Image (cartoon, rainbow, N blue to C red):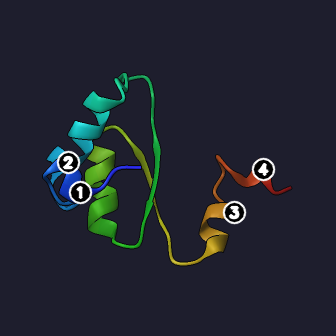
């Protein structure tokens, strides 16, 4: 888990995602899955090579195509 205060950049700053990419040595072929309730942050995650999805309820996670198989 990463905290924006620990990283030194808020989630609304693309450097937040870039710092995590570096810390985890995420390659350009990998697409980490990220949920947030703010579409503008999802867009930043996407610009950093992540798959982002808007989260408004637990169903959003359970029904996500990459995770659905875990519950069904």
Residue at (26, 45) in percent of width and height? 17
In this rendering, the count of numbered labels is 4
Give residue 49's quadrant in the image: top left
Q: Point out the residue furthest to the front here.
A: 6
Q: Quadrant of residue 40?
A: bottom left
Residue highlighted by disc 2:
7
Res. 62 mark: 3
Q: CA distance from mark 2 to mark 3?
A: 29 Å
What residue is pinned by disc 4?
Answer: 70
49 in relation to 65, above or below: above
| First-in-chain label (2 vs 4) | 2
Element type at marker 3?
helix
Residue of label 1: 4
Answer with mark 4 or mark 3, whichever residue precedes in sequence. 3
Q: Is residue 35 above or below residue 66?
A: below
Q: Are marks 2 and 1 in contact (CB under 8 Å)?
A: yes
Which of the two marks, 1 or 3, is nearer to us in this view?
1
Packing grade of label 4 (10 A; few <14, some 14-19, many >=20) is: few
- Measure the C-alpha gap from mark 1 to mark 4: 29 Å
- Mark 2 surroundings: few (<14), some (14-19) or many (≥20) residues within 10 A: some
Between disc 2 and disc 3, the foreground one is 2
Label 1: which secondary element: helix
């Amino acid at each position: 888990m990463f905290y924006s205060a620990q990283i030194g950049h808020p989630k609304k700053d693309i450097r937040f995602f870039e710092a995590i990419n570096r810390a985890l040595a995420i390659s350009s072929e990998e697409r980490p899955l990220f949920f947030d309730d703010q579409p503008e942050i999802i867009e930043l995650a996407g610009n950093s090579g992540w798959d982002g999805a808007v989260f408004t309820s637990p169903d959003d996670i359970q029904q996500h195509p990459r995770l659905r198989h875990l519950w069904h």
